[in-house]
Amino acid sequence: MATWTNWAGTATAHPRTQSTPGSAAAVVAAVERARAAGSTVRMVGTGHSFTDVAVTDGELLHPAALVGVVDVDRTAMTVTALAGTPLKVLNAELAHLGLSLHNMGDIAEQTLAGAISTGTHGSGGTWAGLGAQVVGLELVTGTGELVRASSTENADVLDLARVALGALGVLVTVTFAVEPLFLLEAVEAPMSWDEAVGSFDELVAENHHVDLHWFPHTDRLLTKRNNRLDPGEEGLAAAEPLGRLRGWVDDELLANTVFGLAVAAGNRAPAVIPRMNRVTSRALSPRTYSDVAHRVFTSTRRVVFREMEYAVPRSVAHEVLAEVRRVVDASDWRLSFPVEIRVAPADDVPLSTAYGRDSLYLAFHVPRDVDHTAYFAGVEAVLRAYDGRPHWGKLHTRERADLAPAYDRFDDFLALRDRLDPDRVFANAYLRRVLGD
């Protein structure tokens, strides 16, 4: 029996059978097989979720044959793609068409289905989450029905399925609202903790997208401010990307190779981590460049890690940042990865972590081979106390009983699940934990 393991090695599946459907009809057939056998079926993506959200002991579907753009509507400014398409493939196809998503996260390896199902988001902007940019979809329900959902057809399904954990059906296509391809200017610079946190509200208000990376055991942060450019008559030719050598040195040699060696050294001798973080944070230098949006938003991550991320109300940002810092400084943890800090506007996606409220996101990482338990539990307690919502695709300990009060429309989602998957063809241990039986 073949096994499947996710990118970080935190989830493993032992399915009875595996297949690679190339059409909606093939997905329907797989669901009907599972339903007839009283079994289960799940579609995996590229394994970038850290939870066991995609695990099944029934039939495991692979997305490799459901790739590509299938429709471009320049009047409506929408693009429809097969749900197994990796984000990096969609970004390249959109750029070729002169189009772009409004916003995206900083990793582009995930499939479209995996990214929207778990609530992948970006920072700042008007629509931070990918789910908020979805205007249509097709999915195969637990009864084997192919359902098309848009604002005019099965609108209730669209409303709730934009972040759905794979609990409502297997996504076949996803339609995004898009816009003309645009340029972003990235300004990266080190700051002290007091400078960055003290000017946090101004940073967010004055820039389109802001990411902060705090190095534990130091008072230093790396700030990244991304802003849309007015290219004028030059258009996209106005871009001033990093030179090939500078880009390779910064983003491949230093951010991946050298950082990977430092992480490995810290794994062997944790006592050296605080000193390494101080040296690394002091060695940071400013840089400014501009490029088409997806090349600025996303980066390559070759050092494998485990991650937990929470969204808390933007209104308590300063209190949460201070308390997280206090807890980390008071601990004996040795943390080689920066803590990532972002913000996002409220959206209307019922199971989105930003549903109904402007949000502050904090992401915590450890190397793949390091036990995350004490660190994640310690900061999770802080974030829960401030009405935090965990990222669905990242490690957390929450269960249905304490997740339901965090989402005003949790019961609406459960009711739609009962309707679309009455036999729980898509059930697994993760869904039973966070949604119930």
Image: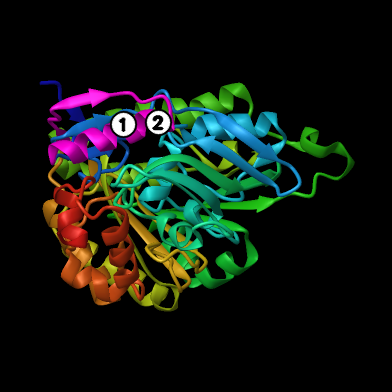
Q: What residue type is labelled 1?
A: Ala
Q: Total of numbered circles in the picture? A: 2
**Residue 409, position in %: x, y?**
36, 72
Looking at the image, residue 232 sits to the left or right of residue 187; the answer is right
Front in this rendered view, residue 368 or 20: 20
Q: What residue type is labelled 2?
A: Ala
Residue occupying image coordinates x 41% and y 44%: 139
Which residue was labeled with disc 1? 29
Relative height, residue 304 to residue 362 (above, below): above
Q: Is mark 2 on a helix, strand or loop?
A: helix
Q: Quadrant of residue 264?
A: top left
Residue occupying image coordinates x 56% and y 45%: 175
Residue occupying image coordinates x 27% and y 69%: 383
Residue occupying image coordinates x 57% and y 59%: 151
**Residue 273, position in %: x, y?**
23, 43
Start-end of magenta stretch = 11-38
Residue 396 is covered by the magenta coloring: no
Q: Is mark 1 on a helix, strand or loop?
A: helix
**Residue 168, position in %: x, y?**
33, 52
Residue 185 in view (yes/no): yes
Q: Pick the quarter of the image with the N terminus.
A: top left
Which residue was labeled with disc 2? 25
Q: In which quarter of the image is residue 112?
A: top left
- Rate crowding at label 1 as few (under 14), some (14 to 19) or many (20 or more) other CA atoms within 10 Å: some
**Residue 341, position in %: x, y?**
41, 58
